[in-house]
């Protein structure tokens, strides 16, 4: 049996990522996937990136849209989205506080990645296999999944971005979104992740939600005098308005 831990959209929420790591025995996993968005909205981007860097070859990481924006700002480009100044603060704070090693690591990531396990080709994406900014939900019409399955070289497509966990098998392709480790939008602030098991070519997927010390996230925001909207977002488990 092979086991793959599916993580994504950590958004610099290291207390949540650490809770997931502590909850599981990480040694048992053959791969640990990250569907992107390591950075922005909590104050632990360095700890978060370092956690994945430490995994070395076991980690299968990609760049998310927030990470991409960070790299653009660092290149001197203007931040167009989000438009609200209050929301932009965390992007600039992240750029100022990321270590040189972690910036180099972010620069090394691509918008998609893949690996093969037990002859099973698995693709890792942020939004979808054809567009990093596309959002897939459990309610997304099957026709969209059929389009993504068409000519897919991957038996499994793993994605994040929508922060909504799901597992669907459509047109022979397994689509898995593990949800967001650090920033769920469904009113339940607990960390979300999934485990994919491959047993003699058969796949099994299980989703999890676990609590984490939210107070540490709030302390980090207060210590750095960041806008109250971020704390409210994490406490409520809802999107920023
Ligand atoms: Fe995200």
Image (tube, rainbow, N blue to C red):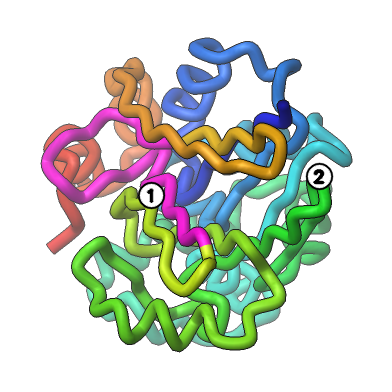
Which residue sits at x=45%, y=24%?
Answer: 15
- Percent from the top left, x then y, of residue 28? 72, 18
Q: Secondary structure at mark 1?
A: loop
Q: Which residue is mark 2?
A: 118
Q: Secondary structure at mark 2?
A: loop
Q: Residues within 10 Å of mark 1 (few under 14, many from 20)?
A: many
- Count of marks, rendered view: 2
Query: Which badge, 1 or 2, comes first in the chain's sequence?
Result: 1
- Percent from the top left, x then y, of residue 20? 49, 22
Left or right: 158 with respect to 88?
right
Q: Quadrant of residue 13?
A: top left
Q: Quadrant of residue 198?
A: top right
Left or right: 18 with respect to 119?
left
Q: Quadrant of ligand 1?
A: bottom left
Give the label, 1 or 2, closer to the camera. 2
- Percent from the top left, x then y, of residue 120? 75, 54
Which residue sits at x=45%, y=81%?
Answer: 79
Q: Residues within 10 Å of mark 2 (few under 14, many from 20)?
A: few
Q: Which residue is mark 1?
A: 41
Which residue sits at x=63%, y=86%?
Answer: 151
Query: Quarter of the image containing the C terminus?
Result: bottom left
Looking at the rendering, the stretch of residues picked out in magenta corresponds to 174-193
């Amino acid at each position: 049996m092979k086991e793959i831990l599916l993580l994504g959209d950590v958004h610099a929420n290291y207390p949540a990522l650490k809770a997931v790591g502590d909850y599981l025995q990480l040694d048992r996993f053959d791969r640990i996937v990250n569907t992107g968005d390591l950075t922005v909205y909590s104050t632990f981007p360095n700890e978060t990136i370092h956690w994945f860097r430490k995994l070395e070859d076991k980690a299968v990481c990609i760049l998310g849209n927030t990470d991409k924006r960070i790299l653009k700002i660092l290149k001197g480009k203007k931040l167009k989205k989000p438009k609200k100044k209050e929301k932009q603060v965390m992007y600039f704070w992240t750029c100022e506080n990321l270590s040189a090693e972690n910036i180099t690591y972010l620069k090394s990531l691509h918008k998609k990645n893949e690996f093969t396990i037990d002859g099973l080709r698995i693709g890792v994406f942020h939004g979808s296999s054809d567009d990093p900014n596309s959002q897939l939900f459990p309610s997304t019409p099957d026709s969209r999944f059929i389009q993504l399955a068409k000519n897919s070289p991957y038996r499994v497509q793993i994605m994040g971005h929508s922060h909504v966990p799901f597992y669907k098998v459509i047109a022979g392709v397994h689509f898995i979104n593990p949800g967001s480790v650090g920033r769920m939008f469904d009113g339940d602030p607990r960390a979300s992740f999934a485990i994919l098991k491959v047993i003699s070519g058969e796949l099994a997927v299980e989703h999890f939600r676990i609590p984490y010390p939210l107070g540490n996230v709030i302390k980090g925001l207060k210590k750095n005098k960041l806008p109250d909207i971020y704390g409210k977002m994490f406490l409520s488990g809802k999107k920023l308005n």
